[in-house]
Amino acid sequence: MRHTDRIATGILASLLFIPGAVSGQAGMYGKEKDKLSRQAQMYEIAVRQGVNATLTEWREAWERDDAEALSRLYLEDATLYTETATIQGRDAIAEYFRRVLPLRSGRRSLPVSFDASGVLAFQVEETTVEFAEGEGRPRIRTQRELLVLRQQWDERWLIQSQHTTGIEDEAAR
């Protein structure tokens, strides 16, 4: 067999056997991809459960007007951004809630969106707050809140920052 014939035979043989090898590799990569996809799904489920537990406590503390329970859901160095102020640290946030909670007469909050990456989770809520204003009708304020939560060493999620932006502010009809 001449040298050029051997090369041609080698090329032909490789063309016959490579597709099998490649499809075997594709199957292996497909299994790895499925495994990673399942891991990502398990991660998202675990994150959502942890974040939901914290935000359920957060909503319940708002409903009870419990400034202390509410502030415990924030990191020690958390930041609360309102439209008029930036409040830094858990103690200052607790003081803010002690002042604000008695002024309102109702609050409803609905989740709008959620995302997570590593030890951070991001939840957007649309919140409607009613403020009692003397003898008149209450003032109703609709706002968006972006909550950034950080996972702790004990797997618990705490609020690192909260950003509040007003959407609508009107007197109740």
Image: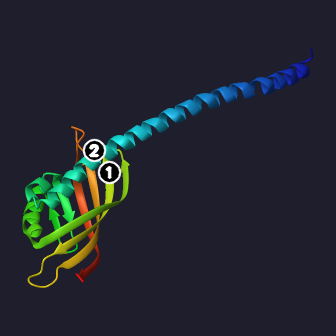
Q: Distance between the residues labelled 2 and 1?
A: 10 Å
Q: In the displayed structure, does residue 86 sit left or right of residue 99?
A: right
Numbered tag placed on residue 121 in the rendering: 1
Residue 15 in the image: x percent, y percent?
80, 27
Query: Along the line of sight, which residue is nearer the eye, 74 or 59?
Result: 59
Residue at 27% from the left image edge and 58% from the top image edge: 147
Q: How many labels does the image show?
A: 2
Residue 60 x/y as whole percent: 18, 55
Q: What residue type is labelled 1?
A: Ala
Crowd class of label 2 (few under 14; some 14 to 19; many from 20; radius 10 Å): some
Residue 29 vertical position relative to residue 60 in the rendered view, above or below: above
Residue lying at 24% horizontally and 65% vertically, measured from the top left: 108
Quarter the C terminus occupies: bottom left
Residue tagged 2: 50
Residue furthest top in the image? 1
**Hey, which quadrant is residue 41 in on the image?**
top left
Taking the view exactly as shown, the residue that stands out farthest to the front is 173
Q: Which of 1 and 142 is in front in this view?
A: 142
Question: Residue 9 lies in what quarter of the image?
Answer: top right
Looking at the image, do the residues carrying marks 2 and 1 touch, with CB atoms under 8 Å apart? Answer: yes
